[in-house]
Image (spheres, rainbow, N blue to C red):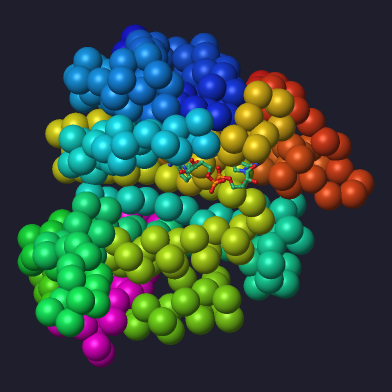
């Protein structure tokens, strides 16, 4: 029997509640598909700070680096607002991503048909929407040097950040974008600001070269990031894969998230070069306003596990089954509070997990 090593890092706030539902699905998969999961658990974020004085301990990191896939809940909350910047819950997550060399962030923006009316756009614009963002995660303006706030000779201050991309950094994310497109609709839109930024110009040149050399079967279009933002609200279904840098990916994928209805529905993956495990986590945060009340939507976390099955565990068919179960539960009008509308049935976090299990059993 195939054995997969999984590490679950529930984190803070609603993290433990949504992870409990992921565990139910992990159990279901192991029984239904005769695979076995060796599941370990660890602390990350504020709960780790409370227990060990750091948001990610060396020991947890070591265990995480040795598994096949890591599923995380969320970190953070007002309890740790006063903690030093380098010990804040978010610092644990940043360290984990860095130590995994996770440079490729995959964020699907999928609009389930049953939720099309919850979108900020008209149903016909979003129904059936299926975009995959491939965002560079480990470089660009969030990391570039020099950075800081300096005082000028006249006593006024200047804030400095540097947009910086090497050829190698652009090449490796471009490969991920084209490979993903091959598994989907075969189209890549590469978004940058080559009209006003040299880093954007280099991005465009390298993406073009990689495309010509290796991926002539994939359709490539270059798009300026500001136009991409407009097209996402004008005609989002024109896109298949959107390949972009760290900053534009942050903004554009959040914009697309609103097209799909709710934060509670959106999974993500952060992948490195394959030598270390992928990190899978919902896009949403720890939602301290609803933590512990059974109100959280576990679907983003469950879909994150589905992404782990597809991208790290080579079980794409099982991932598809889980995604179909989500689709069907929503079609049955079963909803957690965040996606509830009049006429649908409001359920708790654990009832949503049970509804998914039942659908999987019936499929
Ligand atoms: P948030 O995503 O936690 O919450 C935003 C809103 O969406 C809240 O009203 C919340 O109740 C709701 N929401 C989020 N997830 C939900 C779910 N699964 N089901 C139902 N409703 C859901 O963002 P925030 O309030 O800005 O941040 C709260 C904390 O989370 C902060 O400490 C922040 O730093 C942290 N955060 C962590 C991550 C992460 O771990 N990757 C990401 C974003 C924010």
**Can residue 283 be found in the magenta stretch?**
no
Q: Position of residue 264 (x, y in %)?
A: 61, 43
What's the residue at 56%, 19% (across, down)? 20
Taking depth in this image into account, of 99 and 85 the one nearest to the observer is 85
What's the residue at 52%, 18% (across, down)? 23
**Can residue 185 be found in the magenta stretch?**
yes
Judged left or right of residue 106, residue 349 is right
191 is higher (above) or lower (below) than 342 = below
- In this rendering, the count of numbered labels is 0
Q: Position of residue 16 (x, y in %)?
A: 54, 22
Q: Position of residue 108 (x, y in %)?
A: 47, 53
Quadrant of the image where one finds ligand 1: top right
Taking depth in this image into account, of 53 and 242 the one nearest to the observer is 53
For the N terminus, the image quarter is top left
Say whether residue 94 is visible.
Answer: yes
What's drawn in magenta, residue-wise?
180-201
280 is higher (above) or lower (below) than 126 = above
């Amino acid at each position: 029997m195939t054995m997969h090593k999984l590490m679950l890092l529930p984190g803070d706030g609603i993290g433990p509640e949504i992870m409990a539902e992921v565990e139910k699905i992990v159990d279901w998969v192991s029984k239904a598909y005769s695979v076995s999961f060796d599941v370990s658990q660890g602390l990350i974020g504020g709960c780790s700070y409370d227990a060990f004085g750091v948001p990610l301990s060396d020991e947890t990191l070591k265990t995480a680096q040795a598994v096949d896939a890591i599923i995380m809940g969320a970190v953070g909350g007002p309890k740790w607002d006063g903690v030093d910047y380098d010990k804040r819950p978010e610092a644990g997550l940043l360290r984990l991503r860095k130590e995994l060399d996770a440079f490729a962030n995959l964020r699907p923006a999928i609009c389930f048909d049953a939720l099309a009316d919850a979108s900020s756009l008209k149903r016909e614009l979003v129904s059936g929407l299926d975009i995959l963002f491939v965002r560079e995660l480990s470089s660009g303006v969030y990391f570039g040097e020099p950075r800081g706030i300096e005082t000028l000779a006249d006593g006024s201050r200047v804030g400095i950040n540097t947009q910086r991309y090497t050829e190698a950094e652009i090449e490796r994310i471009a490969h991920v974008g084209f490979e993903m497109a091959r598994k989907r609709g075969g189209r890549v839109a590469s978004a940058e600001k080559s009209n006003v930024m040299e880093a954007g110009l280099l991005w465009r040149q390298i993406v073009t070269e990689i495309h010509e050399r290796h991926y002539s079967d994939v359709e490539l279009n270059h798009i300026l990031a500001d136009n991409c933002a407009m097209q996402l609200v004008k005609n989002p279904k024109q896109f298949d894969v959107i390949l972009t840098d760290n900053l534009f990916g942050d903004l554009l994928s959040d914009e697309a998230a609103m097209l799909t209805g709710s934060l509670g529905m959106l999974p993500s993956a952060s992948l490195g070069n394959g030598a270390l495990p992928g990190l899978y986590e919902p896009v949403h945060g720890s939602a301290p306003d609803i933590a512990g009340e059974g109100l959280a939507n576990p679907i983003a976390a469950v879909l994150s596990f589905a992404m782990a099955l597809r991208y790290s565990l080579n079980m794409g068919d099982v991932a598809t089954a889980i995604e179909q179960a989500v689709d069907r539960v929503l079609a049955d009008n079963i909803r957690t509070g965040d996606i509830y509308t009049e006429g649908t049935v409001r359920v708790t976090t654990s009832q949503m997990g049970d509804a998914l299990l039942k659908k999987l059993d019936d499929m």
